[in-house]
Amino acid sequence: MDMNEGIIMLGSNVNADENIRIAKERINDKFEIVAESTILITLPRKDKYKNYFLNQAIMILSDEYYADTVKFFKQIEKELGRTESGKEEGSIPIDIDFVFWNNTAMRNDYERWDFVRTCIDQIKDKPFYKS
């Protein structure tokens, strides 16, 4: 199978430095991280979120299917304490979302949010070598 390129946004408002670091370690255990943006601090956009967020874009190479890669990310979110009730209460230990998969937009976050665009623009044109 050819390598797939994914651009992912990581976000956290609970132990954010640590949770983003751990999420990247777990992702890097299975996939190659080929580029990382700087980490941005963003203010909460809804009243339910009490803490600021840290956000970062990363680019990965994956030899797995999209759906299997998403399942792996959901497993990491669960391991780091992400729950539906926590989300409703404004507590996001880690959020891992694909924004692009093989240059196809998977969500409208790039167009919708300035911080997503800022992070992704730092890495989207980085050269790397596909094996």
Image: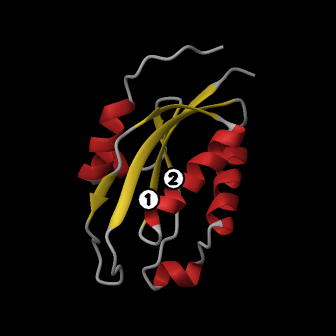
Count of labels in the image = 2
Q: Locate residue 17, reporting x and y percent.
A: 45, 60
| 10 Å crowding of disc 1: few (<14), some (14-19), many (20+) | many
In the shown orientation, is residue 127 left or right of residue 73?
Answer: left
Disc on res. 11: 1
In the shown orientation, is residue 121 left or right of residue 59?
Answer: left
Q: Is residue 95 visible?
A: no
Q: Which residue is mark 2?
A: 97
Q: Nearer the viewer, residue 76 or 16?
A: 16
Residue 30, quarter of the rendered image: top right
Disc 1 marks a residue whose amino acid type is: Gly
In the shown orientation, is residue 38 left or right of residue 21?
Answer: left
Q: Locate residue 59, reporting x and y percent.
A: 50, 35
Work out whether 84 lies above or below 20.
below
Residue at 47% in and 30% down: 103
Work out whether 80 lies above or below 62.
below
First along the sequence among labels 1 and 2: 1
Quadrant location, the N terminus: top right
Q: Locate residue 113, reporting x and y percent.
A: 28, 54
Q: Nearer the viewer, residue 17 or 12?
A: 17
Work out whether 83 lies above or below 56.
below
Residue at 33% in and 42% down: 119
Residue at 45% in and 86% down: 89
